[in-house]
Amino acid sequence: MKKVLILCMAVLSFFVLSSTVLAASAMDKDTLLVGTESTFKPFEFRNEENKIVGFDIDLINTIASKMGKKVEIVDMAFDALIPSLLTGKIDMIAAGMSATPERAKRVAFSDVYYTTPDAFTVKADRTDIASLDDLDGKKVSVQLGTIQDAFVSKRKGLEVKRYQKTDDAFREVLLGRVDVACVDGTVTKENLKNNKDYTDTLKVAFFHPISQTGMALAMGLEDMELKKNVNAALAEVLSGPTFQELKDKWGID
């Protein structure tokens, strides 16, 4: 009987402790661990000093400052961001992530802060691809785990090549290994304008809005305290001059 009682008390203690951990908010921390993927210029990328910079980085630092928090950026593969959030390795995601209904089943999103169409990029001398209908039988490169990946993977008649970095998706087009790259429109325009390898060799064949949900910051589903504070700070940024200043700084339309 004594052993049974001890076992029951141990199980009860475990569940109480687990509930406490689950109920804890990142708002209790001084520094927020924010996951990103640093090949999504101009939203997040490494500069010449190998420091991670960009629109999202400035945005999350501004939001955190208004919340009285510091930020530590954690760089990882895009498809590892949500799993890392779910396992508590990071507190938030700031990575140009679209707030899709599928993702919203696993994470809590902030209010949307930016929307952009998606671009289909080909070699500059190609004229045979101008719409979705022209993709039949073509090879398409995407960044693994993105909405572009999900979109083209659902279309029949395509061969999809997935890469960890957006730069690899573009480079495969340049090398002739795929016919077209499907990447976020703003990121595509940045690369074709400022990457000398692509400026004269690649072009946007057409734009297509894959998702209307827009970009948002991601947090744990249970952390409503963090979400409330993030949205309050984000609303303040969006309603003042800071947001446009950040867009101007990073060349975002």
Image (cartoon, grey):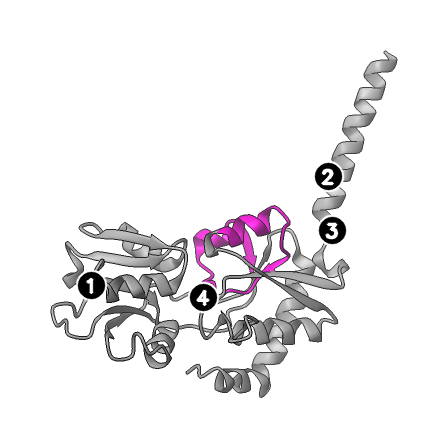
N-term-proximal mark, 4 vs 1:
4
Dividing the image into 4 quarters, which one contains the N terminus?
Answer: top right
* Residue type, label 1: Leu
Q: How far, Cα to Cα, is label 1 from label 2?
A: 49 Å
Tag 4: amino acid: Thr
Of label 2 and label 3, which has the lower sequence position? 2
- Residue drawn at x 34%, y 72% as measured from the top left: 188
Give the magenta-colored segment's residue range.
80-109
Q: Which residue is mark 1?
A: 132
The reply to whether the C-beta atoms of the residues labelled 1 and 2 are less than 8 Å apart is no
Residue 106, magenta (yes or no): yes
Measuring 75% from the left and 60% from the top, which residue is drawn there?
Answer: 29
* Distance between mark 1 and mark 3 Cα atoms: 46 Å
Between label 4 and label 1, give the one nearer the viewer: 4
Q: Is residue 155 left or right of residue 62?
A: left
Q: Work out how far the residue at label 2 is from the one at label 4, CA to CA, in angstroms.
A: 36 Å
Residue 18 bears which disc, if any? 2
* Rendering coords of residue 198 (x, y %): 29, 75
Q: Secondary structure at mark 2?
A: helix
State the residue position of label 4: 39
The one of 99 and 189 positioned closer to us in this rendering: 189
